[in-house]
């Protein structure tokens, strides 16, 4: 018959080992705070960059609107003239209004007049060009 002995978890030296209970840490480390600050900084920087771009585009749109309205006014005034007056060259020239430089030429064609209006807006690289063809019947 076999003898039964109690099974002990003690090491051979006879002392029982203590099991360390690990408590979960409360709070956050300095490294986690630094990473969070860097992520927030990058996000805010991206937002500021895109808002500056939107502001520039809105300003450019406003200046283009001014240029288009000036060109439309010039085309309206030139189309009110007769083809004979346009052919005489009385309708070519240039002017500057509200910081926008505007020049226009009238080209005489066969039974048509071509009006070409060019507008240069400040802080814009390319000039804007508007054309209109007028049939002549007089």
Image: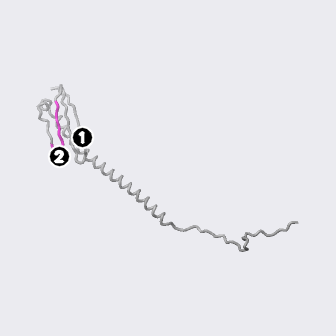
Image depth: mark 1 or mark 2 in front: 1
Q: Is residue 75 left or right of residue 6?
A: left
Q: Give 4 or 48, whichever is nearer the viewer.
A: 4
Q: Pick the quarter of the image with the N terminus.
A: bottom right
Q: Is residue 7 left or right of residue 31?
A: right
Residue 105 placement (x, y as % from top left): 16, 35
Q: Give 39 or 134, whichever is nearer the viewer.
A: 39
**Per the image, is 101 magenta?**
yes
Give the SS element for disc 1.
strand
Q: Is residue 39 left or right of residue 8?
A: left
Q: Which mark is residue 128?
A: 1
Q: Pick the quarter of the image with the C terminus.
A: top left
Give the SS element for disc 2.
strand
Q: Residues within 10 Å of mark 2 (few under 14, many from 20)?
A: few
Q: Residues within 10 Å of mark 1 (few under 14, many from 20)?
A: some
Residue 128 placement (x, y as % from top left): 24, 40
The reply to whether dot 1 and dot 2 touch (C-beta < 8 Å) is no
Q: Give 33 or 105, whichever is nearer the viewer.
A: 33
For residue 88, above or below residue 60? above
**Secondary structure predominantly adopted by residues drawn in magenta:** strand
Residue 24 placement (x, y as % from top left): 58, 67
Badge 1 or badge 2: first in the primary sequence: 2
Q: Residue at x 19, y 34 (%)?
A: 115
Region rendered in magenta: 95-107
The residues bearing labels 1 and 2 have C-alpha atoms spaced at a distance of 15 Å
Residue under numbered circle 2: 97
Q: Residue at x 43, y 60 (%)?
A: 38
Quarter of the image where one finds residue 95: top left
- Residue at the right extreme of this rendering: 1
**Per the image, is 62 magenta?**
no
Q: Residue at x 16, y 33 (%)?
A: 106
């Amino acid at each position: 018959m076999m003898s039964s002995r109690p099974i002990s978890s003690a090491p051979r030296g006879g002392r029982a080992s203590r099991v360390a209970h690990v408590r979960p840490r409360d709070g956050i480390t300095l490294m986690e705070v630094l990473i969070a600050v860097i992520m927030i900084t990058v996000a805010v920087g991206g937002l500021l960059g895109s808002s500056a771009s939107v502001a520039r585009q809105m300003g450019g749109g406003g200046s283009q609107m001014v240029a288009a309205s000036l060109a439309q006014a010039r085309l309206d005034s030139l189309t009110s003239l007769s083809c004979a007056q346009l052919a005489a060259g009385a309708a070519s020239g240039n002017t500057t209004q509200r910081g926008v430089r505007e020049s226009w030429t009238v080209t005489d064609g066969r039974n048509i007049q071509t009006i070409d209006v060019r507008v240069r807006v400040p802080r814009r690289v390319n000039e804007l060009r508007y054309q209109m063809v007028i049939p002549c019947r007089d």
